[in-house]
Amino acid sequence: MSLKEPLHVPCYHCGEPCEGSNIALEDKIFCCEGCKMVYEILNENDLCRYYQLDDQAGISLKGRRQEHYAYLDDKEIREQLIDYSNGEHTRVRFHLPQIHCASCIWLLENLYRLNDGITQSKVHFTKKEIQLSYLESQTSVRKIVELLASIGYAPAINLGDADRPKEKAVSRRLYFQLGVAGFAFGNIMLLSFPEYLGLSSEEDQFFQHIFGYGNILLAIPVVFYSGWDYLRSAALSLRHGHFNMDVPISLGIITLFVRSVFDILTTGGAGYLDSLAGLVFFLLIGKWFQQKTFYHLAFDRDYRSYFPIAALLKDGAGERSVPVQKLDPGQTIIVKNGELVPADGLLVKGGAQIDYSFVTGEAEPVHIPIGEKLYAGGRQVGERIEVTLTKKVSQSYLTQLWNDEAFQKDEDSTTQRLADKVGRYFTFIILLVSFATLAYWLPRDLSIAINAFTAVLIVACPCAVALAVPFTFGNSIRILAHNQFFLKNIHVLEGLRNIQSIVFDKTGTLTGVRHTEGQYVGEALHALEKQMVQSLVRQSAHPASQQLDQWLGNTGGPLEISQFEEIAGQGVQGVADGRQIQVGSRTFTGAPPTAGEGVFIRIDGDIKGRFEMGSRYRLGLEEVVQSLKTRYRLFLLSGDNDRERAHLEPIFGGKDALLFQQSPGEKLQFVKKLQADGKKVCMIGDGLNDAGALRQSDTGIVLTENTNNFTPASDAILHAGQFHRLPLLLDFARKNIHLVYAAYSFAVAYNIIGLSFAVQGTLSPVVAAILMPASSITIVLFGVLSSNLLARKMQLHIWGDKNQSIV
Amino acid sequence: MKIILLLIFISLIVALGFLGAFFWAVRSGQYEDEYTPSIRILLDDEPSSQNDNPATSKK
């Protein structure tokens, strides 16, 4: 076989280039047997429309390891996954990270054509989730999962699924409340027409009367259903002795309602019920606007979202699957290639090559000799190993981090929010003004006194103030999401402005895991040799092989490899084009001990050279650090040894800012220590080992290359590609507070106008009905427009598809 | 002029109907997934040239 002219032939199934592939069916060419098999399944079942619906249909099965789903036959494990079952009809949900296009939806919703037992399947695209109903008599969870895996959609099943609430009750309450308030608002305005038009003939008086009663009926659900949460929250905060924003709001709602009902029943006046309904309606819209859910992200994951649900227990002579929570110290489990070690243990059999990248961010697997300790969270690469456990899953070196008190406390209760602080002053001022008004009028005229007193409470109701934060911050977190900086909620944005110290993790945060670049040392390889080496390493899923593959770039099509062999922990070898190639460790290739470190390449018995894997720092690291240093105190914590100290010290400046060989627990303690000094700390990390520090910090930001990947619990997620813009994004978050202050001053101006009517006892329902919506709408428009304007000035993206941008 | 009472009454009934429709929409989960249905609506029809007897949906 000779060097082939590269032809650009995409695989019919997955679309990846498959030059030189001889796997074909009729006129269709496939990159691998897996893809061909999927095509055959789909073709047999008349599902080939899959390929026409979307250009990007088809998921490559290359390098996909064979999962074993035998554990799904275990009743105990199965029951943890199932949402609902009555013995015959069963409902189950799976997370399918592969969902990416219209074809996926079509195929997955046509699953019943591949398995008769499936009665319904429904895809939630943004959550990348499928909900399936099936008949127990005809199929099983295992069969369905195997079917999904066989067509390229292997479900992500992990320990977190077992603990999740069954069929979580989605909060639809806000929608109902909003619907009721909107309905009442519109109809009360309709019924208030006689008042708006100032009609005063006798017949009009009659209408006004009837309509007044109608308005009361409409307003009752507004107060007691739509506005109930405000009243309850106000009562709760009063009981705890502190005023939040809901106190003046509730004061306004109650006064509006009581005064209006009184007016209508006694004097036949119109009351302020239209203002009341409008107020509640706008408040609820603000509440809805600030709740932005990023479905494709999870801010609350812990190790369970990453750990397997079952382990293979060695039980006497046999093997059986058990739920990992049931594993006890002393038991021996089997961990196969690509599987995760669920609890700390000692290696008793097999060659362990453990990839701790999710735990530490370190890309290179570690070789563990027999009898040595394995830590939970590492992934075995290579042959199957046997491990005798020394700890329970929840008590392991890594997982015990979650037993720290930092994970017990309720995060939200610790932050003092701006709106609540403003609310406190607001309540105070309103009460002051209203009682002053009362005191002024009481000796002069009782009815004006009552009138003016209630009018002050009504008009001062801080609807506009309460809307400033939801709309300004709510819009800003949308803008930040367009820039691939995802905040959990608006309170995170508020918290960012107080940050004084930023703590970085090193591996995986300042260095990119995937972008590690290598360096080749030795005799230069010519084109055919490069092609041979690449063809060989492509057969292996080892990270070093993948890195080498990437580094080699496009060398032409893959050559046929015969006598391929992968020796776990050592390397790969095979014969291409009649020549023997070995790629692997020094001992594997037989290179002299003086040759240095790295992956050695040996062709036909000659050591050609070695490939050094390097770790590259993220783009713009120096600029980012320089820019952040002017405002924040910076620290660096690394679980790694300090070989990079010389490189990092000049960037960070100061020896004490860098700490190496930090355990997950020490990272957490470091953040705690900074906080004890009264500092507000922002932790930026990526791996599970940062989870404690992320949680303990005031704002935890996770950096990730791909949001489908595991990210530990955090307040914010930043796409790694945006790292160089971090100072800009933080700056934007910080400047937002000025917009809120500006919105507040608008609200105060409106209030002063309203109050000037109110204290004189001349606030007519019409004035209130105009003033309140006008101020609310002004604030809404100001909040949205000003944050957009600020973003444009700072050259941030304002538009873009936030769901797709990060996939 | 009294007829206006009847008209208002009818308009309230109609508005209640819309409120009921909104409730039904929320309850049936239409506000939980705002993206997938927009794609799904484009997928239902099988092209007749490809497939002579389109499979009927079980849903």
Image (cartoon, rainbow, N blue to C red):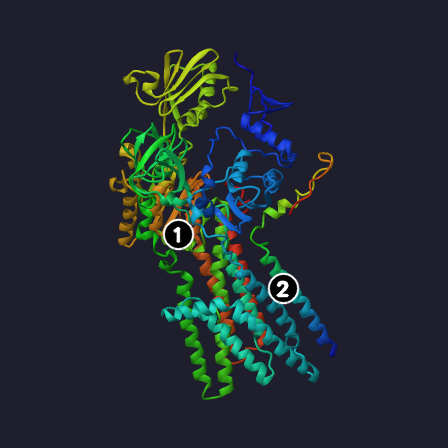
B52 horizontally vs A583: left or right: right
The answer to whether mark 1 and mark 2 are in CB contact below 8 A is no
Q: Secondary structure at mark 2?
A: helix
Q: Nearer the viewer, mark 1 or mark 2?
A: 2
Label 1 belongs to which residue? A496
Q: Residue at x 54, y 15 (%)?
A: A4
* Residue A552 drawn at (x, y percent): 45, 22
A693 horizontally vs A20: left or right: left
| Type of amino acid at the residue the image marks with label 2 | Leu
Give the CA distance from mark 1 to mark 2. Answer: 40 Å
Give the number of the disc on residue B19.
Answer: 2
Tell which of B6 and A355 is nearer to you.
A355
Tell which of A680 and A174 is nearer to you.
A174
Q: Secondary structure at mark 1?
A: helix
State whether residue A277 is above or below residue A532.
below
- The image quadrant where one finds the N terminus of chain B is bottom right
Question: Chain ID for label 1?
Answer: A
* Residue A766 drawn at (x, y percent): 59, 74
State whether residue A554 is above or below residue A432.
above
Q: Residue at x 35, y 29 (%)?
A: A353
Query: Would residue A755 be seen by someone viewing this image from the given angle?
Result: no
Query: Would residue A427 be seen by someone viewing this image from the given angle?
Result: yes
State whether residue A148 is above or below residue A464.
above
Tell which of A333 and A184 is nearer to you.
A333
| Type of amino acid at the residue the image marks with label 1 | Leu
Give neighbour class at mark 1: few <14, some 14-19, many 20+ (Cα, 10 Å): some
Give neighbour class at mark 2: few <14, some 14-19, many 20+ (Cα, 10 Å): some
Give the number of the disc on residue A756.
Answer: none
